[in-house]
Image (cartoon, rainbow, N blue to C red):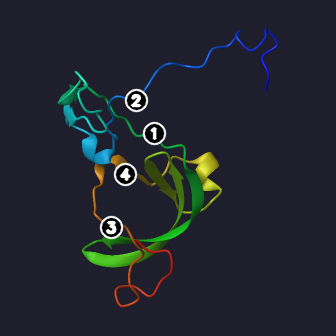
Amino acid sequence: VASPGGPNAVRTSNFALIGAYKLTLASIGKTQFPLEKVPFLCPLEGHIYLKMHCEVGSKVEERGFLTMFEDVSGFGAWHRRWCVLSGYCISYWTYPDDEKRKNPIGRINLSNCTSKAVEPASREFCARPNTF
């Protein structure tokens, strides 16, 4: 696309890559990063030092029935609950209409839960679908 001010109105950049480092999740918590792709005889060498602050944001919102295992007077019982996942929190009620009319029976703050894997319960553990 030609510039309306002529070919010299918008100049191309003279910036050149003289060092790089790819930030990843593994970079979180580190402050020193080795420079890569530094040209030979460049005065820039070694490491770059950064202070980072990372936050995770979630705008997920899902609704549906899940089966939950609860302790009732020392005995286990499976209950189907209407659940709402909003951000990092699962809130649950007995019925879908309760969501608008009542406070939830309970809430699970997922930001406090850590696990290497989250997956449906196996059929050997519980034959009910949508169980956790």
Task: Reply above or below: 96 against 121.
Answer: above
Q: To which residue does mark 2 refer? A: 17
Q: Which mark is residue 57?
A: 1
Where disc 1 sits, the SS reads loop
In the depicted view, which residue is nearer to us: 24 or 109? Answer: 24
For marks 1 and 2, the one nearer the N-term is 2
In the depicted view, which residue is nearer to us: 121 or 74? Answer: 121
Q: Residue at x 59, y 58 (%)?
A: 63
Q: To which residue does mark 4 refer? A: 110
Q: To which residue does mark 3 refer? A: 117
Mark 3 to mark 1: distance in Å?
Answer: 20 Å
Residue 19 at what x, y percent from top left? 32, 31
Where disc 2 sits, the SS reads loop
For marks 2 and 3, the one nearer the N-term is 2
Task: Reply above or below: 35 against 64.
Answer: above
In the depicted view, which residue is nearer to us: 76 or 114? Answer: 114
Front disc: 4 or 3: 3
Q: How many marks?
A: 4
Q: Label 2: few (<14), some or many (≥20) within 10 Å?
A: few
Q: Label 3: few (<14), some or many (≥20) within 10 Å?
A: few
Residue 69 at what x, y percent from top left? 37, 73
Mark 2 to mark 4: distance in Å?
Answer: 41 Å
Q: Say if mark 4 contacts mark 3, CB within 8 Å.
A: no
Front disc: 2 or 3: 2
- Extreme-front residue of the structure: 41
For marks 4 and 3, the one nearer the N-term is 4
- Image-quadrant location for residue 65: bottom right
Q: Say if mark 1 contacts mark 2, CB within 8 Å.
A: no
